[in-house]
Image (cartoon, helix red, strand yellow):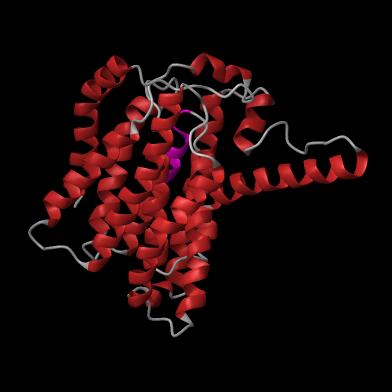
Amino acid sequence: MLSIFLFSALLVIAFMPLCLKFLRSMRIGQIVRSEGPVSHLSKSGTLTMGGVLFVFVTMIVFTSFSAVNGFTSKICLIIYMTLAFSAIGFLDDFLKFFKKSPYGLKARESILMQIILAIPFLIFAMRLKNLGLNLILLGLFDLIVILAITNSVNLTDGLDGLLTGISIPIFIFYFLILRSEPISNFSLAFAGSLLGFLFFNFYPAKIFMGNTGSFAIGGAISAFVILTNTELLFLILGGIFVIEALSVIIQVFYFKYTKRKYGVGKRIFLMSPLHHHFELQGLPEPLIVVRIWIIQLLFFTLSFILFNIFAFPNLLN
C-alpha cells in the first residue's frame, strides 16, 4: 500500500515540469483580488489550475491498482464526487481565465451546481447507510455537510501550501480507519499526489491548485465523511476548516450588525478568513502555514484516538 502513496507523489513530481510548461504556454496565471492582502499582489501571474494534475494522477494510480479487484459501489461514489466537484472548480477557473478576472462562477451558481451534483451521490450513499434513521432527513443533513465541507475547504485555500498540507493528514486518517477496504487506497493515492504537489506549492509557490483542486479535495473529503458516518467526528478532524469558515461567518455577521446599528460596519478580524488576519498582523506566510499544519496534526491525532475509544469503527459499513 505504501507503494501507492510513493508512486502517486513521484508521478506528480515527474510530470509537474510538463504541467508548468503547458500552463505557462497557455498563460494560465492567477489573477489576485484587489481586496485581498497587499502582499498577495506579487503572486499575480503565478500559474494555477494545478489541481488538474494531482486529480489526474490520483485517478490513474488508484484505478491501476484497483483494476484487479474491481470497483465497489463506494469506490465509484468517491470517484464521482471527486471528479464532479473538480469539474465545478474547473469551470470556475476557466471563467476566470476567459474573462481575465478574479471572479468566475457567482456564489449562487456554484452552490446550485454543488447541490445538483451531490444529489446522485446522496441517493446511492443513503442506500449504504445502516443507521436506522429517516433517510430523507439524513440525506438533507448530509447535503448540508457536503456544502459546508466543500466551501470551507475552498475558503482555506489562501496561502502557499496551506490547504495541501492540511488535506494530507485527513486523507491519511481515512486510509488508517479503512485499511481493510479497497476504498482506502484512494485516500492513500490522493495523499501521495498532494505530497508531490506540495513540493511545488509551498512558499514561494510555483503553482496554485485553483478551484479545480480545492473543489476536488472538498468533494473527496465530504464523500469519505458521509460514507464512513464520521460527520460529527469531522468537526475535530476538519477543525481548521471549521475555524476558517466560522471566522468568515462571524466577520460578515458582525460587520452587518454594527453597520445596521451604528451606521458604520466594524470588524473583529483584520481580514477573514483567519489566516489573512495573521498575515496582516505581520506574521510571515510560511510561519502561519507551518503552525496551522501542526494544529492539523494535533486534530488528526485527537480524532484517531476518539475514533478508537468511542467505538466509531462500529459505524463503518
Where is 7 relative to 219, above or below? above
- Where residue 210 appears, as percent x and y from the top left, is 41, 33
- Where residue 23 appears, as percent x and y from the top left, is 30, 21
- Where residue 53 appears, as percent x and y from the top left, is 27, 34
Q: Note whether residue 168 is visible.
A: no
Question: Is 143 positioned to the left or the right of 187 in the image?
Answer: right
As drawn, the residue found furthest toward the right would be 262
The image quarter containing residue 68 is bottom left
- For the point 50% across and 33% down, the residue is 290
Where is 293 relative to 26, above or below? below
What are the residue bounds of the magenta stretch? 160-168
In the picture, the quarter occupied by the C terminus is bottom left
Residue 24 or residue 68, whichever sits in front: 24
- For the point 43% across and 36% down, the residue is 92
The image quarter containing residue 6 is top left
Residue 164 in the magenta stretch? The answer is yes
- For the point 49% across and 42% down, the residue is 154
Where is 48 relative to 312, above or below? above
Question: Is 212 positioned to the left or the right of 159 in the image?
Answer: left
Where is 82 relative to 193, above or below? below
As drawn, the residue found furthest toward the left would be 68
Q: Note whether residue 46 is visible.
A: yes
- For the point 53% across and 62% down, the residue is 144
- Where residue 162 appears, as percent x and y from the top left, is 47, 35
Residue 114 or residue 151, whichever sits in front: 114
Residue 211 or residue 43, whichever sits in front: 211
